[in-house]
Amino acid sequence: MASTPETQTPIRLDGTTLEGGGQLLRVALGLSSLTKSPIHIIKIRGKRSGGGGLKAQHLTCVQWLGQASNANIDGAEFKSKEIAFIPSKIVERSNSLLSVGDVRIKQSTPGSVNLVLQAILPYIIFSGVEAPIRVCIDGGTNVSNSPSIDYVVQVLIPMLKLIGTPHIGIQIHSRGWSQGSATVGSVTYTISPLKERLSAFQLLDRGEIVSVTATIIAPKDTERQFREELDFMFEKRQSRFFGDTGDRHDRVDTTFENSHHNKRYYLLLVATTSTGMKLGRDWLYDRGFRAGKLEQIIPTIVKKISDDLLAEIEHGGCVDEYLRDQLVVFQALAKGRSQVYGGKSDGESVKPSLHAKTAQWVAKEMLCVEFDDEGGCEGIGFLPGDMSQYYSADHGLAKHLDSMSISS
């Protein structure tokens, strides 16, 4: 007899596995809410300094997804290191948080709005709701060690559209920063859920680099130096970016925005390929500001980010390191075998990052999907909004859930 959400044993996840941070929690919560699979996470963020546990941003994700999936939650407290999250088998569509079309998620600190988005996006995209959902999130748009809103707009959203998800609109109402004086910003994402299963996608042919955009956000009086440093860098490294053909001047576009603080320096470089793919690397400067050394900040930023992007370009992969882990959930939920080519270095395939490996591990534990060394995965073919897939023993997802219950 197939297990049901009432009898299914919670999937136990150790929060110190692999990367041991918030990635594990976000992916697990999103998949749990979507598939109605109960989870029990211990040692949350166990490899993080300061003792780990739920930070305010993680608690925001737990609370919102818990409300959306009508989950029974134990341990949803600040700094909690253990949580049980048991979604209800039925969420009345008329009472759903998504039914009104407008969602507001407030944070009083500049916790990354984009990490909150990362946790809730699969739930919304695969919810089966017919009308677009507007999600307004307060928090940090430019936060150290988190995807920036600029990266999301220029890399993540175009690449999600390329693999078959509907376009996501973004309106930045105000920026929120973790550097300089901490400030809380606000962003609205307009998300159109899928109407049918996400088809398997193949990111195997990157093509040539056709253009690069540079986004600078820094103190106004640094604009000239930033532009000059970038011009010099592109002139020196033109062949490494674009090969031996063409003039870089019609391939590079640079924008500058005043950061309104003398300790906020941010640079994003995005390469666009002939097949429409995007590779990005960025840095919100988070080192010291020592007197007499300020003139070295801009050359340091330009060198680091150009080095990072060139490394991505030269290994030939179709995605950058940070996008690769964000596509894992979509590979796992798509119908059929999806492949994401990560490139080669010194004749060997570029290994996924710890973040990507962590996401793959969670997907394997929860959905019984496997990722091979070449970036391939046979997804479960999740049908948006179809509650019957949780109960039909003949359906692929039900079989996954049943096998997990037995193995427990």
Image (cartoon, rainbow, N blue to C red):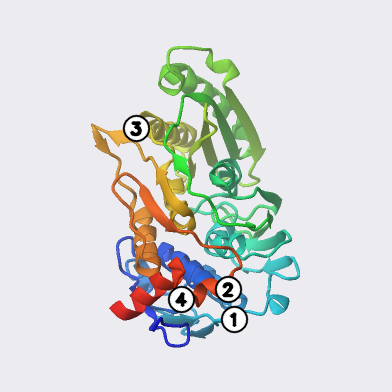
* First-in-chain label (1 vs 4): 4
Distance in Å between CA atoms under marks 2 and 3: 42 Å
> Which mark identifies residue 90?
1
Mark 1 or mark 3: whose residue is earlier in sequence: 1
136 vs 79, nearest the viewer: 136
Residue drawn where x is 45% and y is 79% of the image = 38
* Mark nearer the viewer, 4 or 2: 2
Rendered view: 327 above or below 47: above
Question: Mark 2: few, some, or many residues within 10 Å (few <14, many ≥20)?
Answer: some
What is the x, y in percent for residue 373? 28, 47
Q: Is residue 399 above or below residue 118?
A: below
- Asked whether the residues under the numbered discs 2 and 1 touch, taking CB atoms below 8 Å apart as contact, a structural biologist would say yes
Q: Residue furthest front?
A: 394
What residue is shown with label 4? Answer: 37
Give the quarter of the figure containing the C terminus: bottom left
Residue 247 horizontal/vertical position (percent): 53, 13
Cβ atoms under marks 2 and 3 closer than 8 Å: no
Residue for badge 2: 387
333 and 262: which one is in front?
Answer: 333
Q: Quadrant of residue 313?
A: top left
Q: Say which of marks 4 and 3 sits in front.
A: 4
Q: Secondary structure at mark 4?
A: loop
